[in-house]
């Protein structure tokens, strides 16, 4: 039992020492960082008003940028929807109003609307229902 205790005490003390050393190193780093920040704050004190303006202007510019991106995305979506609706409307008009509508050679394809007369003449001798 004494052997176990005698082995346990150095291990516990070693762990405690490591913990205290880690905490001490952390406090040392915080203290040094505080000194650096304090010195930097002293050096920047005359420029405090300029720094505040930079923060305000930078924040405003960021907000304006995000708003601009949002408006651009919304306008692109609206533009795409309008273009899609316009194309659908044009196709519907071609299918219903075109003088070749009903002919077996006619299709609503913009690239080749008619297999016999791609130029779609007003009066076609080949019109077939």
Image (tube, rainbow, N blue to C red):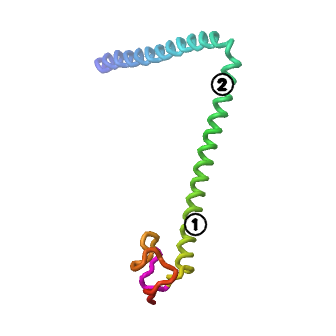
The quadrant holding residue 65 is top right
Residue at position x 47%, y 84% in the image: 124
Residue 3 place in picture, x, y as percent? 28, 18
Left or right: residue 52 versus residue 34 is right
N-terminal of the pair, mark 1 or mark 2, is: 2
Residue at position x 67%, y 13% in the image: 45
Q: Quick one: quadrant of the N terminus?
A: top left
The quadrant holding residue 56 is top right
Q: Nearer the viewer, residue 92 or 70?
A: 92
Residue at position x 49%, y 78% in the image: 121
Q: Residues within 10 Å of mark 1 (few under 14, many from 20)?
A: few
Q: How crowded is mark 2: few (under 14 residues within 10 Å), some or many (20 or more)?
A: few
Q: Which of 40 and 102 is in front in this view?
A: 102
Query: According to the image, label 2 marks what residue?
Result: 54
Residue 26 colored in magenta in the image: no
Left or right: residue 103 versus residue 92 is left
What are the residue bounds of the magenta stretch?
102-108
Q: Nearer the viewer, residue 128 or 93?
A: 128
Left or right: residue 6 versus residue 123 is left
In this picture, is 9 found above or below 66? above
Query: According to the image, label 1 marks what residue?
Result: 86
The quadrant holding residue 53 is top right
Q: Is the magenta stretch mostly helix, strand or loop?
A: loop
Residue 37 place in picture, x, y as percent? 58, 14
Residue 105 colored in magenta in the image: yes
Q: Is mark 2 on a helix, strand or loop?
A: helix
Whether residues under marks 1 and 2 lie with C-beta atoms below 8 angstroms apart, the answer is no
Residue at position x 54%, y 79% in the image: 98
In this picture, is 102 found above or below 40? below
Residue 90 place in picture, x, y as percent? 55, 71
Q: Label 1 vs label 2: CA separation?
A: 47 Å
Q: Is mark 1 on a helix, strand or loop?
A: helix
């Amino acid at each position: 039992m004494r052997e176990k205790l005698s082995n346990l005490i150095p291990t516990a003390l070693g762990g405690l020492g490591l913990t205290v050393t880690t905490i001490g190193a952390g406090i040392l780093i915080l203290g040094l960082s505080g000194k650096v920040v304090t010195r930097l704050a002293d050096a920047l004190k005359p420029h405090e008003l300029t720094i505040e303006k930079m923060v305000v202007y930078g924040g405003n510019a960021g907000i304006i940028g995000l708003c601009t991106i949002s408006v651009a995305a919304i306008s692109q979506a609206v533009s795409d929807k309008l273009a899609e609706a316009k194309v659908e409307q044009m196709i519907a008009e071609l299918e219903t109003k075109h003088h070749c509508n009903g002919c077996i050679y006619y299709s609503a394809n913009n690239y080749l609307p008619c297999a016999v007369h791609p130029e779609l003449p007003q009066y076609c001798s080949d019109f077939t229902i």
